[in-house]
Image (tube, helix red, strand yellow):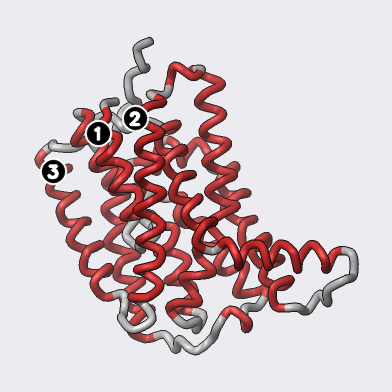
């Protein structure tokens, strides 16, 4: 992988990770166009996802510290268990379980059959329409202080749908939040917080598995670090922009974009410009 390709993929990851448009779909499509039908690679994808998730940690740092502190103090009886931050801490843990369990159970399918770009195109369109319906019809009145155990688990299963490329982690969880009656900003905030343990765990597991199989030589470290830094910086700006944007705007532009991207992807697949199932990248030459 060259420096320019890594730079572009870092920009793509940073721009798309937090928008409800599926970063995995974008990285796969752009990666194929650069690598002549080859996927950028599991290790590369895992590392740059950790970069964008670091942006979530930085942006919500004060919230995360407060939640972790209150949750920890509740374990020793110094904070009431019904404290809003304590409940939110438990709900993040609860909501992280579905994607962890389903990711392990269906790992083989996720890494093989579900990577078909035909399926990605269908998910882009289908969940785009679902997001549009939810945004237009849901009664968005609740905030995160009203988050229940049932809703937290529903969020978790919605996040697990992002194991299918094209669904979008933020898109799936935000759609669920809207359908459950939460305000747009509240749905997005919980979606971002919920993604932290899921992405760190899955990304770290995938990264170390890749390194264990191929060693450090399987990763082009210089370009990968560049892509990670770029995705972090851009992701941080996107989070701030998105939370301001959705406080006064609907998700309609993202719905239209998803439908357009699905149509473009079908054209690329039909004309053979991209392969339905990309192959692994060649090993890095020492």
Q: Nearer the viewer, mark 1 or mark 3?
A: 1
Percent x, y for residue 194?
56, 61
Q: CA distance from mark 2 to mark 1?
A: 8 Å
Q: CA distance from mark 1 to mark 3?
A: 25 Å
Of the two numbered discs 2 and 1 on the same chain, state the one appearing first in sequence. 1
Q: Secondary structure at mark 1?
A: helix
Of the two numbered discs 2 and 3 on the same chain, state the one appearing first in sequence. 2
- Reading the image, the residue beneath label 2 is 223
Q: Residues within 10 Å of mark 1 (few under 14, many from 20)?
A: some
> Does 128 sit left or right of 207 as displayed?
left
- Reading the image, the residue beneath label 1 is 5
Q: Secondary structure at mark 3?
A: helix
Percent x, y for residue 220?
38, 24
Viewer-side residue, 35 vs 104: 35
Q: Nearer the viewer, mark 2 or mark 3?
A: 2
Percent x, y for residue 199?
53, 48
- Reading the image, the residue beneath label 3 is 270
Callout 2 touching callout 1 (CB < 8 Å)? yes
> Does 4 sit left or right of 245 as displayed?
left
Q: Quadrant of the N terminus?
A: top left
The tag on residue 37 is none
């Amino acid at each position: 992988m060259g420096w320019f390709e890594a730079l572009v993929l870092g920009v793509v990851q940073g721009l798309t990770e937090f928008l409800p448009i599926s970063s995995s779909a974008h990285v796969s499509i752009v990666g194929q166009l650069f690598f002549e039908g080859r996927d950028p690679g599991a290790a590369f994808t895992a590392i740059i996802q950790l970069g964008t998730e670091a942006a979530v940690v930085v942006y919500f740092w004060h919230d995360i510290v407060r939640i972790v502190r209150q949750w920890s103090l509740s374990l020793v009886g110094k904070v009431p268990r019904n404290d809003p931050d304590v409940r939110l801490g438990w709900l993040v843990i609860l909501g992280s379980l579905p994607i962890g369990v389903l990711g392990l159970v269906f790992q083989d399918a996720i890494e093989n059959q579900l990577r078909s770009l035909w399926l990605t195109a269908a998910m882009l369109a289908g969940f785009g329409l679902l997001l549009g319906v939810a945004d237009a019809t849901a009664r968005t009145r609740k905030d995160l202080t009203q988050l229940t155990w049932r809703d937290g688990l529903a969020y978790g299963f919605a996040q697990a749908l992002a194991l299918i490329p094209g669904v979008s982690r933020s898109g799936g969880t935000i759609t669920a939040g809207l359908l459950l009656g939460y305000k747009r900003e509240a749905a997005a905030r919980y979606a971002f917080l919920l993604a932290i343990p899921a992405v760190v765990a899955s990304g770290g597991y995938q990264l170390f598995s890749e390194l264990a199989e191929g060693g450090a030589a399987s990763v082009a470290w210089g370009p990968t670090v560049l892509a990670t830094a770029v995705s972090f910086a851009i992701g941080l700006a996107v989070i701030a922009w998105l939370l301001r944007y959705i406080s006064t705007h609907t998700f309609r532009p993202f719905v239209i974009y998803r439908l357009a991207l699905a149509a473009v992807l079908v054209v690329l697949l039909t004309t053979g410009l991209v392969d339905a199932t990309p192959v692994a990248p060649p090993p890095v030459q020492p």
